[in-house]
Image (tube, helix red, strand yellow):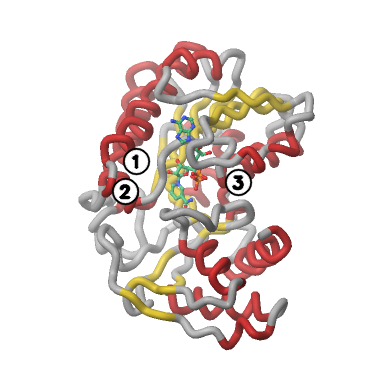
Amino acid sequence: MISDKTILVTGGGGFIGSNLVEELLVSGNKVICFDNFSTGKRENIQSYLDDPHFRLMEGDIRNMDDCRKAVEQVDYVLHQAALGSVPRSIKDPVTTNEVNVWGFLNMLVAARDAGVRRFIYAASSSTYGDSEMLPKTEEKIGRPLSPYAVTKYVNELYADVFSRTYGMECIGLRYFNVFGRRQDPNGAYAAVIPLFVKKLMQHESPVINGDGEYSRDFTYIDNVIRMNLLAMETTNPEAINQVYNTAYGERTTLNQLAAYLKEYLGEFDPEIRKIEIIHGSNRAGDIPHSLANIDKAKRLLGYDPPYSVRDGLREAVKWYWNNL
Ligand SMILES: NC(=O)c1ccc[n+]([C@@H]2O[C@H](COP(=O)([O-])OP(=O)(O)OC[C@H]3O[C@@H](n4cnc5c(N)ncnc54)[C@H](O)[C@@H]3O)[C@@H](O)[C@H]2O)c1
């Protein structure tokens, strides 16, 4: 159990980052949140501002001086700051690269120079690209299908090189479609679950891109938190300098997802059960299916995901019902 440590969460104002901040404070650590609030929200960390164990450092990972300041006296870095979204990267590959590659490299260099104990970073299932193998195992990837996927793969390459060249301890967590409390339902690049929940709550029809038989390994936020904690805690030398699928290990189609959301939201508002789902065209850069093999995380980190997709969806729906 990690406690009494100083932990830097980059992107701590975002969806995943703010959930990590919360968990780390509860378990008795000092937490620094480093964010420029480009996609994150102040309200995500508002309630920690008065906590003496919490510090907000507003800054940009593209600025080396900011990165160096952020890592001072830090034991662990949980690097979450990045520009997410495949469509955003297709529209603006340059900014995505600046933040996700240049910013990542700055953080690695700053962490190396400050002697940070371990650098744990958000990698992505998009690295599997056009590989059709199911389930996905860490060693076998395909060709990237978007600029975003390129940046996330480059992160893994840099982390590996920094481990081997400078003796740093790095661990990459390839997140698979994460969902849960505080994930933003607004904006052009909102993820499918918060987007559908918001539409259904407004009694509007969600639009599924394609026939709805594309599937994803939707992963509840608490499973992702568990993986980050295990990556910090592990003392198994074999487990370090690795990348891990961070998922539940089950496939849900978009049609099933919409049905679950209607069912769970329908418990609060029965009218929602009657809302029709609309189908549109497939989206560029989307892979048809995504499913993780999580054996490596089980074997080397002792991972046992606490939430199934449906249990997680129930929790998420409850949160949106009370907070949107
Ligand atoms: N949500 C998912 O399903 C998913 C899947 C795979 C990988 N990831 C990765 O997980 C991480 C967190 O994603 P999220 O869903 O919480 O997204 P998010 O947009 O909610 O969080 C990202 C945070 O990074 C901050 N940020 C962006 N650019 C920055 C910069 N230049 N300097 C400092 N801070 C900056 C944003 O303001 C935001 O608070 C990202 O690295 C993302 O690529 C997420």
Quadrant containing the N terminus is: top right
Q: Residue at x 25, y 63 (%)?
A: 132
SS class, disc 2: helix
Ligand 1 within 8 Å of disc 1? The answer is yes
Expressed as whole percent of the image width and height from the top left, the position of residue 129 reads 27, 54
Expressed as whole percent of the image width and height from the top left, the position of residue 177 reads 46, 57
Q: Quadrant of residue 19?
A: top right
Q: Nearer the viewer, mark 3 or mark 1?
A: 1
According to the picture, the residue beneath numbered tag 2 turns out to be 127
Q: Amino acid at mark 3?
A: Ile
Expressed as whole percent of the image width and height from the top left, the position of residue 28 reads 76, 31
Q: Amino acid at mark 1?
A: Lys
Q: Quadrant of residue 95?
A: top left
Name the residue nearer the viewer: 112 or 212.
212
Label 1 neighbour load within 10 Å: few <14, some 14-19, many 20+: many
Which labelled disc corresponds to residue 152? 1
Tell me: residue 239, above or below residue 167. below
Disc 3 and disc 2 in contact, CB within 8 angstroms: no
Name the residue nearer the viewer: 154 or 70.
70
Q: CA distance from mark 3 to mark 1?
A: 19 Å
Which labelled disc corresponds to residue 225? 3
Disc 2 and disc 1 in contact, CB within 8 angstroms: yes
Q: Amino acid at mark 2?
A: Thr
Q: Quadrant of residue 286?
A: bottom left
Residue 40 located left or right of residue 28: left
Which labelled disc corresponds to residue 252? none
Q: CA distance from mark 3 to mark 2?
A: 21 Å
